[in-house]
Image: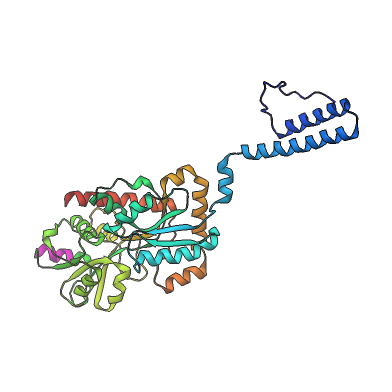
Amino acid sequence: MREPNIGRGSSHLYKGGVADLLELLDYSSNTLTRKYTTSRKTMKFISLKHSLIAAGLTISFLAQPISAFAQEKWPSRQITFVVALGPGGSADRTARSLAQRLQQEVGVPIKVINQDGGGGHVGNTYFLNMPDDGSFFLATSIHPYIGNAILRFDADYDLSDFAFINGQWNDRDLFAVNIDTPYQTLSEFMAAAKESPGTLRVSVVPGSTGAINLNLALEAFGLSQDDVNVVTYQSGGAARTAVAGGQVDMTVLAADGTISIAEYVRPLAVAADAPLPEWEAPTLNEILSENGFESVPVLMGSMRGLAAHASFKQEHPKLFERMVEAYKTAMEDEEFIAGLKAQDIGAEWLGPEKTTEIVESNFEILKRFETEN
């Protein structure tokens, strides 16, 4: 038997692979067997050989990259969804319905906890201080609440600390007038505002995307906020009641929420990339284009979805993708989608790239108006 080409002597550490180790053990046991011919001693060395083979395989196993085995085991324990808003709201309902379905895909329980306060800032901070090993995810209104918290608080985080997975339930703002007003189009409303500045009343929630979309539309038509009488309300419900009851002429609020007063309003436009099936109204940019005005950025309303730690995505990209695929699979489940729709919960799949693009581009708009205010 040939002598294996492996470093010899007690001063050399073994650096070969498993195959080389087996070859060395074969050579050693054969050599030793020739030296010690008694069956008893031969059996000892054969036993030694088997023990060394087992040890060698164990060493080889342990020498594999830890991440490879971590990926196979993930998730190995309960996952927690952090909702940065209070219980019972749209973000909370979205998170809990998603957790129930998604745990079937990942194979471990998913717990949902609420950490509300500071318009999402408390929950965002809590989440970022939790382990970034894929056991915690932020399941909340990821826009505009994260952006607003960054702008309005002394936050020690920014958008780059989050890896957005999906925006599932997305509001688009609706421009709607009271049904008894004479305005059939948004162009007619803006023309009337230009003719009689400050007389037309518009209800908005301060700091909302609706308030910003109103300003964007006024600017595009060559008007300013002073050309309308902006009436602020602290909730969308109150602002909708005002337009339904005729206390104001128009409102700019989330389209989904306005369905409840559809019989009392006339839709004029939607702040979206495409018309919405629930409302017979063109997009704001379609109207601007028809009137020879430049288009404006489309500011999304509230976006409820899921985000991971950015460091989790960077350090464990395959695990991040596994979560993405699990979420996508859930959103392709027709029974699950039907259940969401029955609960009036949105069911869009945008994916990480599109979701991130919307959050980042909309943050620039938020930043501009926060600076001006």
Residue 144 visible (yes or no): no
Task: Please tell me whether residue 194 belongs to the stretch shown in magenta.
Answer: yes
Magenta segment range? 189-195
Q: Please say if 331 is above or below 151.
A: below
Residue at image coords 44%, 67%: 97
Q: Position of residue 272 (x, y in %)?
A: 32, 60
Which residue is found at the position 52% from the left and 52% from the top?
322
The N terminus, quarter of image = top right
Q: Give residue 230's quadrant in the image.
A: bottom left
**Residue 86 in sight in this render:** yes
Colouring: rainbow
Percent from the top left, x then y, of residue 319?
Answer: 52, 49
| Of residues 261 and 135, the one drawn nearer to the viewer in this rendering | 135
Residue at image position (20%, 73%) is: 243
Is residue 14 located in the magenta-colored stretch of the structure?
A: no
Q: Return the x and y of residue 195 as percentages of the image width and height.
A: 10, 64
